[in-house]
Each structure stands twice: as structure tokens, then as C-alpha cells.
Image (cartoon, grey):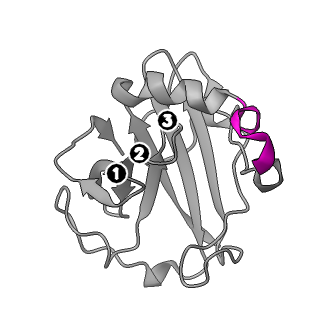
Amino acid sequence: MKHANLSVLVTRFLGFVFVGAVAAQMAAAAPAGNRSQERPVVRAVKVDQGPRIDGFLNDDCWKLADPAKGFLQREPQEGAPATEKTEVRIVYDGANLYFGIRCYDSEPEKIVATQLARDGDLDGDDHLSLVLDTYHDRRNAFYFSVNPLGARLDGYLTDESERFDMNWNGVWDC
């Protein structure tokens, strides 16, 4: 089975805010009535030196983080187990937050990637999106998306994703 590696760097602007939220016990923050609907927790691992952002997940720091896996579909069957395996690792250093994402694909020749423009429409391409609720309010979030060619789209979601501000441009790399 072939796979694509994606290493995403979210720089200082989000790093310090999000790292605290990741390291905290999300279950402890959830209201007592919602304990039966707890979401999985992924722990970010502090490292002395972050990885190279080169598309490969072979830096030693990635070995320190347990991979998040067992993802569910959003489309075409919301809530069904994912048809392809995906692993996500999260590490951080003194300045940055890093996501190492390995997306397996049993038919890599069918991957669609046409967009190269920054903040272009990635809906027609295969792409990966990260939505970071750094305020932990489940209403507002920073949005990052990238396709296999490295085209990037980012923005700020507000009002429970009713509004998407594409004018917000974060400092990040992939």
C-alpha cells in the first residue's frame, strides 16, 4: 500500500496557544453530562528540536509521538470508518507546533491534485484539512488545508463555521 507523507508546521502564532489546549485533558474540561460522548484525545509531545519540513516523516522526533488513527469519514458516509488508513502525530518545540500526517492510499494513481494557487479552491482536489479550536469553545477555529502539490488554503472560522474569513493568513509551512 502506497502512502503520502505530509509534514505541516504551524508557527509561533498558533503554537503557544494550541499546545496548551492539546496537552490539557479534554475529558476533564468536558461538562459532566457529556462524558459518554467524549472525543479521542491526541497528545502533542514536546521535543528539543522540531522536524525538517520536507514531506518525509523520518525525523527521530516523530517516533516519540503516538499516532492518532482510527479516523471516521465525513464524506460520503459520515461517521463510517475511514476507507483508507491515516496516521497523525503531533510534536512541538519551544516555538512551533508540528503535525506529521501519513495518508495511505490503495490507489495512489487516482489522487487528484490540480490546484497550485495559495488560497485557491481545493474542493476539486484531494486535500487534507486541519481545524484548530484554539479557544476550545467549539465555535471559532483556525483552518488549514493543503493538497498533494502543496497548495495551501487557510482562514478563520467563526460562528460555528457559518463564516469563513479567508483574509486571515497564518504563518505556516508544509
Pointer 2: what residue? 141
Label 1 crowd (10 A; few <14 / some 14-19 / many >=20) = many
The amino acid type found where label 3 is placed reads: Tyr
As drawn, 113 above or below 64: below
The Cα–Cα distance between marks 2 and 3, rounded to whole angstroms, is 17 Å
- Disc 1 residue type? Leu
In this image, 136 relative to 34: left or right? left
Q: What residue is pinned by disc 3?
A: 98
Q: Amino acid at mark 2?
A: Ala
Sequence-wise, the earlier of marks 2 and 1 is: 2
Residue 36 visible in image: yes
Secondary structure beneath dot 2 equals strand
Callout 1: SS: strand
Q: Mark 1 — residue?
A: 157
User: Which one is in front, 167 or 96?
Assistant: 167
Distance Cα–Cα, label 3 vs label 1: 21 Å
Front one among 22 and 32: 32
Residue in view at x 29 percent, y 57 percent: 163
Mark 3 burial class by Cα count in 10 Å: few <14, some 14-19, many 20+: many
Contact, CB < 8 Å: mark 2 with mark 1? yes
- Labels 3 and 1: the sequence-earlier one: 3
In the rendered image, the vertical position of residue 14 relative to residue 105, given as above or below: above
Q: Residues within 10 Å of mark 2 (few under 14, many from 20)?
A: many
| Residue range corresponding to the magenta coloring | 25-34
Q: Looking at the image, how many numbered discs can be counted on the residues?
A: 3
The answer to whether residue 152 is seen in the rendering is: no
Check the image and report above or below for 68 versus 85: above
Residue at x-position 71% and y-position 56%: 69
